[in-house]
Image (cartoon, rainbow, N blue to C red):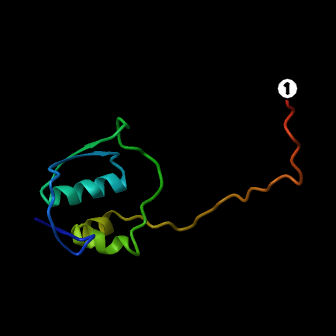
Amino acid sequence: MVWCPLFGEHVLVSVRNVLVVGAGIAGSTLAYWLARYGIDTTVVERAADQRSSGSPVDVRGPALPVVEQMNLLAPLREAATLARAHHREQQRWPDRLDPLPIQC
């Protein structure tokens, strides 16, 4: 029996090995919780190395209690960077769209 936060009760788990595909934020978090509850977990990732760019991870709202339960709040705060400004170029649609020529 394992405590399941999703159901708020102890449940019988027959799965003992799980393969998680993707080492992003969701895959890594899932692997953490599975391992914490005694399930052997293997994570595979297609990328050969860590990416040097990508979307920032914004930890607030419903993610905050999860991070606290994982005891990661202090390390995340130490590693945090602050966005000073965000600029998005405004894209305009053309006034009219010409149909593409159809070749038969």
Q: Considering depth in this image, is 32 or 78 the residue closer to the camera?
A: 32
Q: Residue at x 41, y 75 (%)?
A: 61
| Residue 19, image quadrant | top left
Viewer-closest of 28 and 71: 28
So how many labels did they put on this image?
Answer: 1
Count residues near mark 1 (Cα–Cα under 10 Å), then give few for <14, some for 14-19, many for 20+: few
Q: Is residue 96 left or right of residue 12?
A: right
Q: Is residue 90 left or right of residue 26?
A: right
Residue 96 horizontal side relative to residue 63, left or right? right
- Spot occupied by residue 77 in the image (x, y as percentages of width and height): 32, 69
Mark 1 — residue?
Answer: 103
Residue at (15, 54) in percent of width and height: 14
Left or right of 49 in this view: 18: left
Looking at the rendered structure, the kind of residue marked 1 is Gln
SS for tag 1? loop
Q: Position of residue 43 (x, y in %)?
A: 26, 44
Q: Residue 36 at x, y = what percent?
A: 16, 60
Name above or below for residue 15 compared with residue 49: below
Quarter of the image that includes the C terminus: top right
Q: Is residue 22 above or below residue 59?
A: above
As drawn, 104 above or below 86? above
Where in the figure is residue 13, as x and y percent of width and height? 15, 58
Q: Residue at x 69, y 58 (%)?
A: 89
Residue drawn where x is 87% and y is 33% of the image: 101
Question: Nearest the camera: 34 or 57?
Answer: 34
Residue in front for this viewpoint, 83 or 37: 37
Q: Quadrant of the N terminus?
A: bottom left
The answer to which quarter of the image holds residue 102 is: top right
